[in-house]
Image (cartoon, helix red, strand yellow):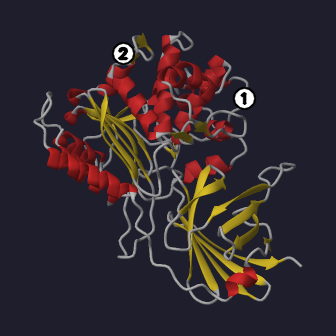
Amino acid sequence: MDSNELASLIDFGASHGMDSLLVVRHGKIVSEAYYAPFRIGLKHRVNSVTKAVVGTLIGIAFKEGLLASPEQRVLDFFSDRTIANVDDRKKALTIQSLLDMTSGIDWTEPLSSAPPTSFFSMERSQDWQQFILDRPMAERPGSVFNYDSGNAHLLSAIITKVTGRSALDYATEKLFGPLGIGDVYWRHDPQGVSAGGAGLYLQPRDMAKIGTLYLQDGVWEGNQIVPAKWIDGVKHATVDMRQSWGPNLRYASLFWAIPSKSAYSAVGYHGQLIVVMPTLDCVAVVTGSSRFPDSSGSPASPRYSLDTLVNLVAGAAKSDKPLPENPAALAHLASRVQDAATEKPTSGSDASELAKAISGKVYHFTDNALRLSSLSVDLVGPNPSYEYVNYAGQPGAPTEQFGGPIGLDGAYRVGGRRSFGISAAKGVWLDKTTFVIDLQTLGNDDAAKVSLTYSGKGVDASFESAGGFRLKLHGEAGD
């Protein structure tokens, strides 16, 4: 592969919100970049790449005889439930229609910037499976593609039905274990079923192992983990995804495919990708995040087409044999990898006279959508930091305490703990009374700004996420 073109690919990642980028060819990593403050050795939330893992587990369950046929009726697995809106169409739901996103369930989750209202409603419900099963039908199963995370969650529930274990536990034995994937986190619904539509956290190198398994037709170290026939079905996907911005996209077994380019991919929101290119013997892995605008006012956008990434990776592949040595190109590639890993600090500011007065004070908040109970910052000690406590999510559950260091020099400080990983935070005084914290969980795609305006014993806290969520709260310091 051409090192100069791989260097250009890494620069493309920097301008498109990537947290990591790996390219594997002929079984070897030929390029690997981690964009600061994300770093090697950390898990990343892979969003809907989770679906492809669930699809893979369904393929394994067929191989083991736990499932008899893709045409098995879905409602037969949930005969212990009373289900609403049952008609002939719902009775015709099959495993295959869930795998192909052609279930026909009435569901709003567009592959666009529009909000996935059905997905949000499902996650707010106390029983995700019941919420999905109770939805009315909009089409006959098998007739029309409609993106629906509920389909994948029902498949995860079916895995639990036929194995007696969660998808996570089943994967640990049958997929993650054989591939040497150990650092995994997987969210679950209130009943303990592994989230099928999103919620899996993996390291980028482990994502590359899953892609390599598919590249090798399901074989890993001589063992047939996934049936070759299953993977062949993904390679030759036929379900039209009906996207005006991607007319060549096809779908199969919870994978996206571009048959015209002999490529297919596990795809997650904000650029989580495992791209498999069999004709090039190549796998590309990307993780990404939403970003706030930089100092120039230009955000690093995670929006680019799968087709574009495939073209860039394929363009770097010049031969099936090693290219002549090119030390200058290798050095250029190494410099771009190093540049990606090097944080570019933002401008700082002079400390406010308020820093000493508010440091260490605990500000308490009434019940709110963030479940924020209290917040404090220490801006004068040798190790500036923040700490907050969340209200319990369920009755009787304990409160949760989180926090970490804060960089005051325009660069993130990494450490501490948030709900789903390691904190990275930096802060600056906007003026004499307002301190602004840039906060994220590394690999969790949750960048946010927290503006704290202090007055007397109170603080007005304004929260803004890069994804668009905004909330204002008022807190009071305790005696």
- Mark found first going from the N terminus, 2 or 1: 1
Quarter of the rendering occupied by the C terminus: bottom right
In the rendered view, does 245 fall on the left or right side of 149? Answer: left
In the rendered view, does 474 fall on the left or right side of 225? Answer: right
Identify which residue, 291 or 50, lies in the foreground: 291
Nearer to us of marks 2 and 1 is 2
Using the image, tell me which numbered label, if any, was put on residue 177: none
Say how many tags the image has: 2
Using the image, tell me which numbered label, if any, was put on residue 81: 1
Does 115 appear above or below 74? below
Q: Which residue is drawn at 37% across and 63% down?
A: 300
Q: Residue 335, image x and y in percent?
A: 27, 54
Q: Residue 367, image x and y in percent?
A: 79, 66
Q: Distance between the residues labelled 2 and 1?
A: 35 Å
Q: Residue at x 86, y 76 (%)?
A: 478
Image quarter of residue 286 = top left
Q: Residue 377, image x and y in percent?
A: 70, 72
Using the image, tell me which numbered label, if any, was put on residue 228: 2
Image quarter of residue 276 = top left
Identify which residue, 271 or 253, lies in the foreground: 271
Amino acid type, callout 1 = Arg
Helix, strand or loop status at disc 1:
loop
In the rendered view, does 220 fall on the left or right side of 385? Answer: left
Amino acid type, callout 2 = Ala
Within 10 Å of disc 1 (Cα), the crowding (few <14, some 14-19, many 20+) is few
Identify which residue, 36 or 54, lies in the foreground: 36
Quarter of the rendering occupied by the N terminus: top left
Helix, strand or loop status at disc 2:
helix
Does 285 appear above or below 472? above
Q: Residue 20, image x and y in percent?
A: 40, 48
Q: Which residue is drawn at 65% across and 27% down?
A: 166
